[in-house]
Image (spheres, grey):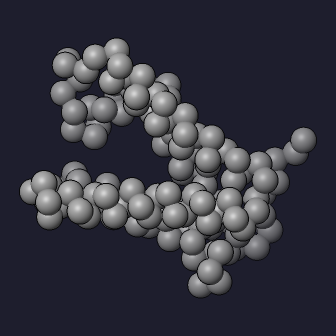
Amino acid sequence: MELYFPSELPEQLAFIGAALVALAGLVLFLMPSAALKAAGFSVGVVTPEGYGATRSTGGMYLGLGGTALLLAQDWIYLAVGAAVALGALGRLISVFADRGATPRNIGFMLLQVVVSCLPLGYVFGYF
């Protein structure tokens, strides 16, 4: 099985978005303590169950992004974009509900918006 890389720019942008999601999942899956520290967690108090939850979340991102990379179908790109967009919505709610207007939280939210726009823009024909 060959890895398909799209030839047209709009689908390449969706592919790159899916690759970024898969890469984030791989980091969460393989290096949960570094990922938690980058997200602002105090790593010393994380229990084994916390590491398990982090790796599990990374596995879901890796599976979703990896599936999009391997199959390159519109519906899967839609799923990737929707998942990341809902994550950004969660961060936006956190800004208002949890007093989460920190530079790190807003930066990650903007990154999620950009990454979600890549596959969604392709699927909905904006690119």
Give the farthest residue toward the right.
1
Residue 50 vs residue 62, the one in the foreground:
50
Residue 97 vs residue 125, the one in the foreground:
97
Q: Which quadrant is the N terminus positioned in?
A: top right
Residue 115 shows up from this direction: no
- Residue at (22% x, 51% y) in the render: 104
Count of marks placed on residues: 0
Q: x, y (%) of residue 69?
A: 71, 51
Q: x, y (%) of residue 106?
A: 24, 60
Relative horizontal placement of residue 49, taking residue 74 as reference (left or right): left
Q: x, y (%) of residue 82?
A: 52, 64
Q: Which quadrant is the C terminus positioned in?
A: bottom right
Give the farthest residue toward the top.
48
Tell me if residue 72 comes above or below residue 44 in the rendering: below
- Kindly indicate the quadrant of the structure image that contains residue 102: bottom left
Q: x, y (%) of residue 70?
A: 77, 48
- Kindly indicate the quadrant of the structure image that contains residue 91: bottom left
Give the farthest residue toward the bottom.
126
Relative horizontal placement of residue 127, taking residue 111 as reference (left or right): right
Residue 82 shows up from this direction: yes
- Residue at (70% x, 47% y) in the render: 67
Tell me if residue 61 comes above or below residue 110 in the rendering: above
- Residue at (20% x, 18% y) in the render: 44
Relative horizontal placement of residue 8, taking residue 101 as reference (left or right): right
Relative horizontal placement of residue 125, taking residue 100 as reference (left or right): right
Tell me if residue 52 comes above or below residue 100 in the rendering: above
Tell me if residue 87 comes above or below residue 117 in the rendering: above
